[in-house]
């Protein structure tokens, strides 16, 4: 599956931003409220200052957007994704002195497909 290209672009962008000088804050971190629903969450994230699309990988069932300041990446499933509708927020954090990727999200469609998608994202992050 070509998913790796999309995932890699989001992870690389987040990783590179960790080395870059701090950009001006785009405000408070986004608070994910799954009760709002997919479209409202998407609209709220895309309205944030400094949120830009990652390079698109044609044919992939996901869209990735990154905050310019590197604080977070946002992953939205497209209708053809098994877990759709779903959204993930990926943030870099330090745990026991090591930089790790943390994920939170909303399973608004098939919960089993969402769990598989989350496991996949976490395995990619762990491999870095």
Image (cartoon, rainbow, N blue to C red):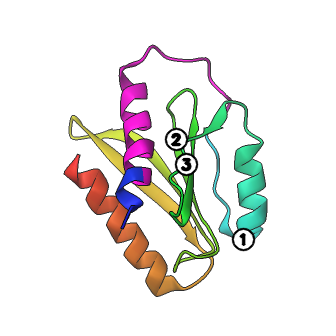
Q: Which residues are magenta?
A: 6-27
Q: CA distance from mark 3 to mark 2?
A: 17 Å
Judged from the image, the secondary structure of the residue bearing numbered disc 3 is loop
Residue placed under numbered mark 2 in the picture: 72
**In the rendered structure, are the residues bearing label 3 and label 2 in contact, judged by CB atoms less than 8 Å apart?**
no
Label 3 or label 1, whichever comes before in sequence order: 1
Graded by Cα atoms within 10 Å as few (under 14), some (14 to 19) or many (20 or more), the crowding at tag 1 reads: few
Q: For the residues carrying marks 3 and 2, which lies nearer the camera in this image?
A: 3
The quadrant of the image that shows the C terminus is: top left
Asked whether residue 102 is drawn in magenta, I would say no
Residue at image point 42% right, 71% down: 117
Which x, y percent locates residue 126? Answer: 24, 53
Closer to the camera, 15 or 2?
2
Number of the label disc, if any, that sits on residue 35 = 1
- Horizontal side of residue 97 vs 73, given as left or right: left
Q: Residue shown at 63%/74% (left/top)?
A: 85
Give the crowd class for mark 2: few <14, some 14-19, many >=20 residues within 10 Å. Answer: many
Tell me the tag on residue 56: 3
Q: Assess disc 3: are there few (<14), some (14-19) or many (≥20) residues with their C-alpha within 10 Å of its C-alpha.
A: some
Quarter occupied by residue 16: top left
Residue 6 vs 3, above or below: the answer is above
Q: Estimate the spatial distance between the alpha carbons at disc 2 and disc 1, rounded to whole Å.
A: 21 Å
Q: Which quadrant: the N terminus?
A: bottom left
Q: Residue at x 50, y 53 (%)?
A: 57
Q: Main secondary structure of the magenta part?
A: helix
**Up-down relation of residue 34 to residue 27 (above or below):** below
**Closer to the camera: disc 3 or disc 1?**
3
Mark 2 touches mark 1? (CB < 8 Å): no
Earlier in the chain: of badge 3 and badge 2, it is 3
The answer to whether 66 is drawn above or below residue 1 in the figure is above
């Amino acid at each position: 599956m070509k998913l790796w290209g999309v995932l890699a672009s989001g992870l690389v962008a987040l990783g590179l931003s960790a080395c870059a000088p701090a950009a001006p804050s785009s405000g408070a971190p986004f608070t994910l409220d799954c009760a709002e629903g997919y479209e409202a969450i998407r609209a709220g994230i895309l309205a944030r200052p400094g949120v830009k699309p990652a390079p698109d990988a044609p044919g992939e069932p996901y869209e990735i957007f990154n905050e310019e300041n590197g604080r977070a990446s946002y992953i939205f499933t497209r209708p053809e994704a098994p877990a759709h509708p779903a959204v993930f927020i990926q943030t870099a954090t330090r745990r026991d002195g090591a930089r790790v990727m943390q994920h939170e999200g909303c399973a608004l469609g098939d919960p089993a497909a969402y769990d598989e998608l989350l496991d996949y994202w976490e395995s990619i992050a762990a491999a870095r």
